[in-house]
Image (spheres, helix red, strand yellow):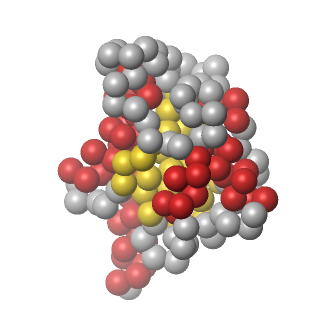
Amino acid sequence: MGKPLIIGCGNPDRGDDAAGLLVVKRLRSMGIAAEEHSGEGLALMEAWSGAGSVILIDAVVTGAAPGAISVWDARTAPVSRGAFRASTHSFGAAEAVELARALDRLPASLTIYGIEGKNFERGARPAPEVLAAVEEVAQRIAEQVQSITKEVEG
């Protein structure tokens, strides 16, 4: 399937909501291509259009401790809109996944990394637990990309 398209969503000015964008920044510092995205649903669908494999990273609110990491395989199960309620978009990542599923426009592989946030106030800084999770998610994705690269170069 080749290297995945990596998309980090969020708002850099809303505290923990910056998590997906911070993962992208960290991956880029490792030499891994990744895209920043606001998380608006229709634009997300357009961004992954034609991609075989997609990794999406966003802040979530599931009730877990700040910095907790959740991973979903969006091909095998519906994505809970409730987990993405930190988004300012009424049509965000969860809605994009489910609409794409209904329209048969999901990528062949769609993995979502959710980083649990707590503070989404304008002007706030990401919590230390969220920053630690950003590093962990970036490392996991980097390992995944390196493994795929080795397979392709085989």
Q: Is residue 102 above or below residue 149?
A: above
Residue 136 position in % (x across, y down): 39, 40
Point out the residue furthest to the right here.
102
Q: Residue at x 61, y 67 (%)?
A: 107
Q: How many marks?
A: 0
Task: State left or right for residue 106 relative to residue 9.
Answer: right
Q: Is residue 113 visible?
A: no
> What quarter of the picture does the C terminus occupy?
bottom left
Q: Residue at x 34, y 15 (%)?
A: 124
Residue 104 position in % (x across, y down): 74, 67
Task: State left or right for residue 12 relative to residue 57.
Answer: left
- As rendered, which of 136 and 10 lies closer to the eye? 10
Residue 79 position in % (x across, y down): 70, 44
- As rendered, which of 145 and 74 lies closer to the eye? 74
Q: Residue at x 35, y 66 (%)?
A: 146
Residue 149 position in % (x across, y down): 37, 74
Q: Is residue 46 visible?
A: yes
Task: State left or right for residue 101 relative to residue 148.
Answer: right
Q: Residue at x 27, y 45 (%)?
A: 26
Q: Is residue 89 above or below residue 117?
A: below
